[in-house]
Image: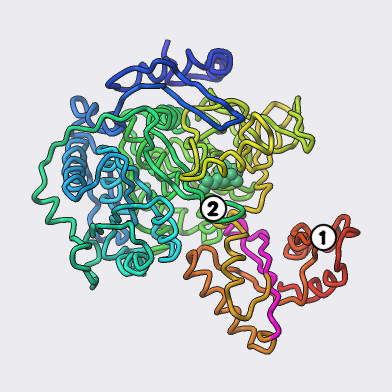
Amino acid sequence: MSYYKIKDLENYFKMYKKSVREPRKFWDKIADENFIWYQQWDKVFEFNMEEAQFKWFVNAKLNITKNCIDRHLNKRGDKTAIIFEPNNPDEEAQHITYNELYEKVAKMANVLKEQGIKKGDRVCIYLPMIPELAIAVLACARIGAVHSVIFAGFSASAVATRINDSECKMVITSDGGYRGNKVIDLKSIVDESLFNCSCVEKVLVVKRTGGNVIMKEGRDIWLQPLLDEALGNHVAEIMDAEDPLFILYTSGSTGKPKGMVHTTAGYMVSTAYTFKNVFSYEEDDVYWCTADIGWITGHSYILYGPLLNGATTVIFEGIPSYPDHSRFWEVIEKHKVNQFYTAPTAIRALAKESVEYIQRFQFKSLKVIGSVGEPINEEAWHWYNDHVGGKRCPLVDTWWQTETGGIMISPIPFVTPTKPTYASLPLPGIQPVLMDELRNEIEGNQVTGSLCIKFPWPSMARTIWGDHQRYKDTYFTAFPGKYFTGDGALRDEVGYYRITGRVDDVIIVSGHNLGTAPIEDNINEHPAVAESAIVGFPHDVKGNALYGFIILKESGENRDKENLTREINQLISEQIGPIAKLDKIQFVKGLPKTRSGKIMRRILRKIAEGDFANFGDTSTLLNPECVEEIKNGRIE
Ligand code: WTA
């Protein structure tokens, strides 16, 4: 009996039970039967939840790219691995076969080695959504370098913070990138960030836009001439199961971004298994995930998961609204996409446009549609299900996180009946629990609580780069012995999970996690600002948008408020990136504080939402009078 593919609901329950009762046997079989290893493991796992120490497939040796590429060459050498759909629909799409991918990755791997990159070195990748991004990621994995991909929408200062945190030796970037009708000068952003990074020795530059760039001698090198000279084969590095594969930064509710570290074997096993089942992928399917490879969704479900299964995966450079709001639908028809995976924010944006943009499409090729990144509201769920899925393709609402590496809770198409706004049931191997405020596990159904996972799974992040204590404190102390997700959830009468949203100070805007504290820190750097507090409020396209309450210094009080608003957003754009800009800024005299000096965000949240009825208990406030003032000045 195959453990790899879940066949029907009965089989799901059976596998789920097995994975809980005999986790060693369950993961042992999956790992053994579906991958190639240089050396098998001594033990399937060992862990200590309190200390946040985890090892999977202990002492096994492998290379993930042998599993993503080499082993497919016999059977699937001429099969398309990657379809590249450029930003401009008039530019021809590229089809890269597995044979070609092998050669491209080998060449890139050889270039990295020649440029001095060794096993264990960190390489920052700051590229638009072009094939070189995938190739650079895989080439790092091939030679055992740790990739740290930074989303190409982050500002120079955010890039510098991330490069310095993990001490990257190299940056791979491009002259520029296309996004709709904009051209983004990535190289000049890198140049600016590198004024503050002494660890970077080399910058490899991909030519994409042909824009003018300054090449710093001794540091910057055009990539193509190096590739032209490189050998087209490469013997993969032998990696330990627990060697780090990559670092990916995610926002925390406080402090600097957290460099989540994922290791090799467990990540490989989980992403392959979840991809196969959640998208019900079959041999000749064309799969498309619209995320950026700069986020975990792109890592796990554009690259690793699909390639591990020998799939055809689409890389799309553009945006849903360019040249018009039919672009997604045109790409689905053009490449006969079978599985389509996107974010609620994109769905909401497209649902707001005229139905004419979508009406003329039949979507005959589609079999499964998916959603990820934030809760999908009922209206968006139905629009997606009806207009794209034609009420015939199962809609998989997949819940997971950068930290979890792979999908945790999701329907399995044609197996689990879907229910609007519910991520439904945990995948085999995943043991979610709901916890109450007293740290007790809540039994039974029709309950809500804080979502925790009570048993390890292979693709969990192992640590935060350079700060294991923070990893432990953030995820394993709120509920001792359990992994705390930071999300709240409810479990319905049949045991289906619905994720209700963050319970900490992370706000999800257009599917991007933003911590309030880092944004506040930036605002407070403005010379006119004394103090600030950011909260989220519901937004019909972005899901949430940011509302800032700002106290000015005396010296700033007479300044023009419109100019100040612009300057503050400019500052945030420069320090973090345009995604963190505030939709509304209200200048206030005071912020509601408790006697211990903590800002009562609950009240600010209510004001931002326009809900003045339920402020709850305000008796502990030090300065209740400011609430009235803030209410009166609320920005519609
Ligand atoms: C949220 C993205 C509801 C959640 C893969 C989580 C979701 C955070 C869903 C992680 C979903 C993700 N339903 N909420 N289907 N998927 N989230 O690290 O709050 O970018 O904790 O990983 O997104 O975001 P991250």
Q: Residue at x 54, y 39 (%)?
A: 400
- Above or below, comparing residue 401 to residue 620 in the picture: above
On screen, residue 628 versus residue 432, left or right, reads: right
| Label 2 SS | loop
Camera-side residue of 509 and 506: 506
Q: Residue at x 48, y 13 (%)?
A: 25
Q: Is residue 543 magenta?
A: yes
Instruction: Name the amino acid, label 1.
Output: Thr
Q: Is residue 421 magenta?
A: no
Please give the residue where the numbered disc 1 appears in the rendered image.
Answer: 594
Q: Residue at x 49, y 69 (%)?
A: 573
Residues in magenta? 532-554
Residue mark closest to the camera, 1 vs 2: 1
Q: Could you give the CA–CA distance between mark 1 and mark 2, rounded to whole angstroms?
A: 26 Å
Q: Quadrant of ligand 1?
A: top right
Farthest residue toward the top? 1
On screen, residue 265 versus residue 8, left or right, reads: left
Residue 518 point in image, percent of width and height: 58, 61
On screen, residue 517 versus residue 82, left or right, reads: right
- Above or below, comparing residue 140 to residue 492 in the picture: below
Please give the residue where the numbered disc 2 appears in the rendered image.
Answer: 251
